[in-house]
Image: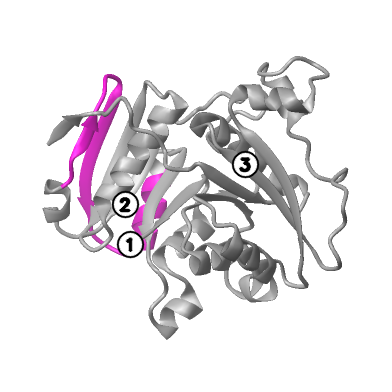
Amino acid sequence: MTTPVNPAMTLPYGRIIHPSDFTEDSHTGLVHAIKLALATGGELSVMHVDADVSRAHFEDFPKVRPILEQWGMLPKGSRREQVRDLGITIKKTRTAAKNPTEGILRYLSTHPADLLVMSTNQYEGLARWQHSPVAEPVARESQTATLFVPANVEGFVVKESGQPKLRRVLVPVSADSQPQLAIDTTAQLATALGCDNLTVVVVHVGDDETLQSIRYPSRTGWLWHTMTCRGNVVEVILGMGADFDVDLIVMTTAKQQSLLDMMRGSVTERVLRGARCPLLALPV
């Protein structure tokens, strides 16, 4: 079934938070956070967790204005107040905590976000136990929509120009995962970024009853492909992501329920560890 896309359809992400460790790996995440703030006309808070007492100055924070100048959205040598003319608000904040995960979660408890944009490293096996993850537990415990941007991937925003390159999206669905939420959010994101040519692959591992109940927004230049597959769900999703060379994976996710989930991670978290593109996780 197809329905006309609502022209007023917008992403419900008025407040975006991007935790940064100031490393080169987190730069791509910052670029995506800035682009989404521009697309939604919202507020972007760049935050950092210090082990000791928070400092009052922010000279070491990543600079947003030079990025906007490089994208041609601000003139060279722009002033801080000119950022507001773009319809967005940029804030910087520090929080003091020995553990980054605890610091971010404590901050979110008093400053809730509509979207987290988090850079992440992908570890498996022994390496995962040797490195304390931050992005996954923050997203899981806060139950906040999170765009994970793996290190060493380009993502769907061109760093040099700020132009979106969202061409192909993979949306895995199941009967108990509120698939319509993933479909509608994909359409909202593509609309906000001005993507006129988009192919979305909707895959269900198992029977196709779930696919038959989904409504697919219709827009010139958008193609929705649906298919069913059988096999290991994580392997299927990662395999299809590689085969179709997708720019983004959109998945709904629930809190871990069992000891096995805690040890292995949810399906979303296991897909994240092998994905070669950003992953948007939507809590249900």
- The residue sitting at 42% across, 42% down in the picture is 12
Work out whether 245 lies above or below 150: above
Nearer to the camera, 2 or 155: 2
Work out whether 125 lies above or below 212: below
Q: Which residues are magenta?
A: 214-242
Horizontal and vertical percent for residue 150? 59, 50
Q: Which residue is mark 3?
A: 44
Q: Which residue is mark 2?
A: 172
Q: Which residue is mark 1?
A: 233
Q: Residue furthest bottom?
A: 259
The amino acid type found where label 3 is placed reads Leu
The amino acid type found where label 1 is placed reads Val
Nearer to the camera, 278 or 49: 49
* 232 falls in the magenta region: yes
- As drawn, is 86 to the left or to the right of 218? right
The crowding category of the residue bearing disc 2, from other C-alpha atoms within 10 Å (few below 14, some 14 to 19, many at least 20), is many
Q: Which label sits in the foreground, 1 or 3?
A: 3
Horizontal and vertical percent for residue 17? 61, 49
Mark 2 in CB contact with mark 3 (< 8 angstroms): no
Q: Toward which corner of the image does residue 51 lie, by quadrant? A: bottom right
Horizontal and vertical percent for residue 201? 30, 40
Mark 1 in CB contact with mark 2 (< 8 angstroms): yes
